[in-house]
Amino acid sequence: MVNSKIMKKLIVIVVFMTTMILSWILPDLYKTATDEAPEYPLSFYSSVADKFCSFVFTDDDFYRTDVDGNRFTQQQFDSLLPMIYTNQLVYDGKMPKKVRGVDVDLQKIRISNFSYRYKPKAYQKPSIKLYPLFESMSARVDLSTPDDVFRISDKIEFIDIESNTVNSEKSVQYNKALYNSGFSGPAKRIAGIPSARKNYDEGYFIIDSNNALFHMKCVNGKPFIRNVNIDKSINIECFEATDYPNRESYGFLFDSSGQMYVLTTEGYNLQKLGIPPIDMKNTVVTVMANMFFWNVMVKVNNSKTTYAIDARTKKYVDSIESINANIVYHWIENIFPFIIKLTSNNDEYIKPRFMTNYPVAFLFNIFFVLTYLCIFRRNRLSNKILPSLWICITGIYGFIACLLFKSDIN
Amino acid sequence: MFKSVLYKEWIKTKWYVIGICVVSILLHAYMFMKLGRSIRFAGMVHLWDVIINKDQFIFREIKLFPLISGIVLGIAQFVPEIYQKRLKLALHLPLPSFRIISWNVLYGAITLALVYVISIAILITYIRLYFAIEFVESAFLTILPWYLAGIVSYFLVAWICLEPRWNRRIINTIISIPILCTYMITALPAAYSSCVILILSIAIVVMFFVYISVIRFKDGK
């Protein structure tokens, strides 16, 4: 009798765990078997035609078009997008001398073209909060990795990598400079490029506990620290440092509403990008910039919007929306009333994430309850109530779990 | 009686426990030698570059050791119980059967936990000698799921081995594999930092699964 009571409790736990495991494994296997690569048209704003031109992918082919539906050959398309196909146009001898009344050449275009990608995964990941501070004016072409790293809690501390001890002298020097500039510890976020494989060094941008942004770098062995004096109405969420050859910007800044800004090197001027705020946890933003326009691609779930913004003013010019053409809907997906995912495309943490699909899946759940009752029609009703309720909630997962442990349940 | 049960389990598994300890020592020695070589050849600055910029955990070799040692000890302890029909005898001792099984399982779990605690302590101490506390914290959060997987694998092997019926053993194995997979998904440093309580809870819950097999064994299922 005692054993039977313990057994019932233990079986409840095992069935619960099996159900949860199945809600992770089954949808994952199904996705692995049926997943298709997303297909979006690739759109760029033409600095010649002043409209979006796109590559549109079909099942086994693609074509080139514009927003008016005109079709283009490869050569026509190259000419429409001289900032994208510069190398090809130069090779063909068809590169115009002027675009939009401005003299252009390969060198100018190469320097002003850049691409940047914001991925939620890069923002939401565990990291070791230690950073190497490079010498920004090393007088050498290549940057060399310093032999210390720093941390900022209430104060800044430099740790010598070789001896694994705090470099007190340097720490005091930087602490003084940091706090004299109005910094208030601890640092909320530290953004920079911690690698020597970058075009040049601009140190780090630090968001302090009062949400103020500070620029810190090492110039000729001495601390350079500036309060960037960002408008107090902007609640800074994240900063991403960049190192583009044109040296026009320090990086991209996002506020708590998801609005994107660019911090320029001209007096730390903050320019708002002419795109709507994004959901920073689920959106991938790709910026493909040229001398005249920035193509900002905002991808969320199965839709992608490409904005054209003016490269100088960062004001909105035009936008085009597209939907993943390769969404394959299988009705069988509704068999899963909920899904547990332990990994995500949007962050690097392992943790359970629940996604429900109840309204439609509930019909399947009822089907599985009836099937269960039919299979075990000869069993006592009291033994069938709890499993039926569980299957009603968890559908196929609970059904399989109850079948696997049927001898202990009944 | 408790001492007798422990002694019996020790006699049965001592060579396996010694083997696990030896492998642990050799593995640690290898990892430390490898780190020493990397420091001599590339320097600490390069190592930091790898850690910070490439999100690499430099002691990845330890990943499978806890899992395999847990499975080995579980098999060494419980397979003879079934094949030599000792479990039947043990359950007929003048003691509550749950107590006997608990002592058996606790012996293995505590032995493994001791080996793991020493292994983690050695690793963390060594890391602290060369790296800052932030890296030590990250390393601990990285290896914790792997060592928990070792304990969980031991409990699951006990659950599978003590199960009297073959078809049910297969079901138990099929369920055990994804449970263990949840602890081994990635080697990315500190990726499990936001679900430490969850993976600890699973380890605690799984500990009780062995009683299902014992009850089924006693009921003659």
Image: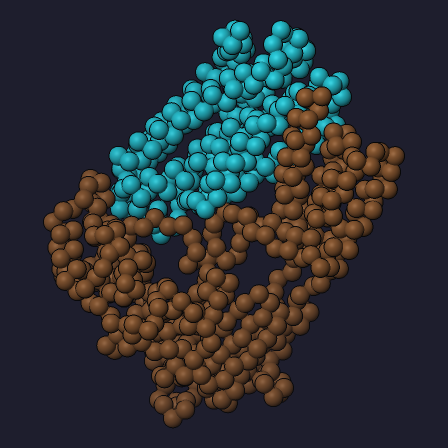
Chain colours: A brown, B cyan
* Quadrant assignment, res A268: bottom left
Above or below — where is A70 with respect to B16? below
Q: How many marks?
A: 0
Q: Is residue A88 left or right of residue A226?
A: right
Position of the N terminus of chain A by quadrant: top right
Which residue appears at 28% of the width and 59% of the height?
A209
The front one of A380 and A145 is A380
Which residue appears at 81% of the width and 50% of the height?
A367
The spot of residue B210 in percent (x, y) is 62, 24
The spot of residue B115 in percent (x, y) is 43, 23
The spot of residue A409 in percent (x, y) is 75, 32
Q: In this orientation, does residue A278 appear?
A: yes
Q: In this orientation, does residue A196 appear?
A: no
* Quadrant assignment, res A107: bottom left
Above or below — where is A65 with respect to A368? below
Above or below — where is B37 with respect to B191? above
The front one of A327 and A61 is A327
Q: Is residue B105 left or right of residue B173?
A: left
Work out which residue is located at the far right of the displayed protein and give it.
A378
* Quadrant assignment, res A408: top right
Position of the C terminus of chain A by quadrant: top right
Which residue appears at 34% of the width and 67% of the height?
A236
The spot of residue B53 in percent (x, y) is 35, 52
Which residue appears at 51% of the width and 76% of the height?
A306
The front one of A256 and A63 is A256
